[in-house]
Amino acid sequence: MILLQAQTAVDSVATAASAPGISLFDLLMKGGWVMIPLLIMFFLTIFLIIERWLAINANGKLEESFIDNMKDFVQQGNIKSAESLCRNQRSAAGRIFEKAIGRIGYSIKDIESTIENASHIEVSRLESNLSYLGVIAGIAPMLGFVGTISGIINIFYSISQSNDFDISTIASGMYEKMVTSGAGLIVGLIAYMGYHLLNMKIDRIALKLQAGAFDFLDVLQKPITNR
């Protein structure tokens, strides 16, 4: 009896090993029509994360040497060189301080307001398209839930047509239910993580810009006070 059970177990393992596997593409296709918008959202999420990451890195750089050199030019009264230095930065910081330098001669309050308004514009540019990630993070799991409902409906429909509660009858509906639920959660998770990580990166840049603005205003205080 023991030998017979062992032989049966070996035969079962051999049968499972020889059974053909399922590719990732075939598995995704078992999710039904809901997988089409989910796949579109997945590729859009990856594109937005990469595009925003590169844009933030390119426009959000703020080197200490740039702030120091700009302050030196302003202290020396070399305003044109300071403007040229800002223009050559091709970054959010360069555009902000270029506008601020252009207001030198006005009151500190006016210059501070110019820096604040320019900073809001530049931060909004860095945040552009991030709202789409937030939308995807909310919609993708809901679409997965729609696929779950669709799979359950498919299961009951198959049972009503065949009058047979067999695993082969409910398999397609279970595939649709589980695949769409998992795909929706994965896409939503990626979009959610990307949205918050990029926002954290923008917050760090905004803090650096604020610190640089304070240093710049400190430099302007002395010549304006001595007038």
Image (cartoon, rainbow, N blue to C red):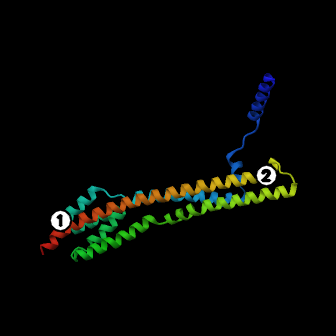
**Looking at the picture, does residue 27 appear above or below residue 71?**
above
SS class of the residue under badge 1? helix
Three-letter code, disc 2: Ile
Q: Residue at x 81, y 59 (%)?
A: 157
Q: Which residue is mark 2?
A: 170
**Looking at the picture, does residue 99 appear above or below residue 188?**
below
Q: Quadrant of residue 138?
A: bottom right
Q: Is residue 81 visible?
A: no
> In the image shown, does 123 or 11 lie closer to the viewer?
11
Q: Is residue 13 left or right of residue 216?
A: right
Q: Is residue 40 left or right of residue 19?
A: left
Q: Is residue 150 visible?
A: yes
> In the image shown, does 170 or 1 lie closer to the viewer?
1
Mark 2 or 1: the one toward you: 2
Q: Which of the labelled discs sits on residue 75, or is there none?
A: 1
Percent from the top left, x then y, of residue 227?
12, 75
Q: Residue at x 78, y 33 (%)?
A: 15
Three-letter code, disc 1: Gln
Percent from the top left, x then y, of residue 184?
62, 57
Q: Is residue 101 left or right of residue 120?
A: left
> In the image shown, does 204 or 106 lie closer to the viewer?
204
Q: Residue furthest top?
A: 3
Q: Neighbour class for label 1 at 10 Å: few (<14), some, many (≥20)?
A: some
SS class of the residue under badge 2? helix
Q: Quadrant of residue 152?
A: bottom right
Percent from the top left, x then y, of residue 4?
81, 24
**Looking at the picture, does residue 131 appear above or below residue 35?**
below
Q: Residue at x 60, y 55 (%)?
A: 185
Q: Quadrant of residue 180?
A: bottom right
